[in-house]
Amino acid sequence: MAHDVARLLLSPPHSAALRELASRAVAETTGDRLHRLALLGQELPIGLRRALVDFRLTGGAGLVIGGLPLHDADLGASPPVATETPRHDELARADAMLLLVASFLGYPVSQAGVDGGRLVRDISPAPGHEATQLGSSSSAELMWHTEDAFHPLRPDWVCLLCLRNPDRTATSLAPIDDVPLDDRTRAVLFEPRFLIRPDSSNSADWQPHPVPVLTGDRQRPFVRIDPAFMTGNPADPEAAAALATLVEAVGGRLRDVPLAPGEILLIDNFRSVHGRRPFTARYDGRDRWLRTVCATADLRRSEGLRTGRAIGVLP
Ligand SMILES: [Fe+2]
């Protein structure tokens, strides 16, 4: 079954309405910000709300929302490193648009071990990180993965807002439904025979225990996989072979989504894997720059494990 990435282009009136809503979100400073954003999200343009409900219910490969009103000149320079708070009103407004969408889809959350638990993070190239498997890499392909694959409470959705992308560097995406698997490989992947470590952006102290790569419906499974942070178990060659088969099959199904400024890509983190193609960083303040936030469908599952919205690891 081939899935396409759905696209929604906001009309000029809806685009203006979103900007107005984001401005209100930035201006209101009393009480809990995420509570306010969740309430304001109910006032998003109806076409956008319908698309988000549709995406939430059907779990398509991904959804691109285009036509977000951003004023590039007011965003400031693309950061060389992650920053704590929005540095300009325009960036605060951009973050509010991203959080309004994420808050309608689910509940924004972060990982306590990544960037100190920061909720909205920068994705931009950093000097010295070029060839790593960090989001701040560039010349190396960021190997496709499930976000926070190691974590039992990994997010349901990854939301990426593109602020700049001068070379149209593609985010890569593959829905697991599209990946052909023989019955034996599928059966092995459903068994708890795989170890997933935290990725190198996460400082969590975590001893992996065996988990299945596929769960849920046999024919339409959920996936959790991060090949760059999984090692084959020499004592279990069948599991290692099944993983290798899946990795190769996913590689053949990856599609490129080159985001443009003013586009949000929503990724179903249970049904799709994502990565990023290589590119050459410039370090001139105009580099590829995304803002990202994750969202969960169920905030209650992490109750007691969270500080604010930052989810820690299970004891
Ligand atoms: Fe990711």
Image: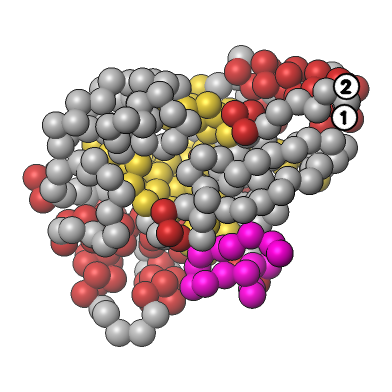
Q: Position of residue 50 (x, y in %)?
A: 49, 55
Q: Is residue 311 magenta?
A: yes
Q: Is residue 279 left or right of residue 151?
A: left
Q: Residue at x 13, y 48 (%)?
A: 76
Q: Tag 2's secondary structure?
A: helix
The quadrant of the rendering that contains the N terminus is top right
Q: Are marks 2 and 1 in contact (CB under 8 Å)?
A: yes
Q: Range of the magenta residues?
A: 301-315
Q: Nearer the viewer, residue 74 or 46?
A: 74
Q: Circle 1 is placed at which residue position?
A: 188
Residue 235 position within the rendered picture, expressed as x and y whole percent measured from the top left:
88, 25
> Which residue shows up at 66% across the image and 45% down it?
150
Along the line of sight, the residue nearer the viewer: 9 or 140:
140
What is the chief secondary structure element of the magenta stretch? loop
Disc 2 residue type (three-letter) = Glu
Q: In the figure, 212 relative to 139: above or below?
A: below
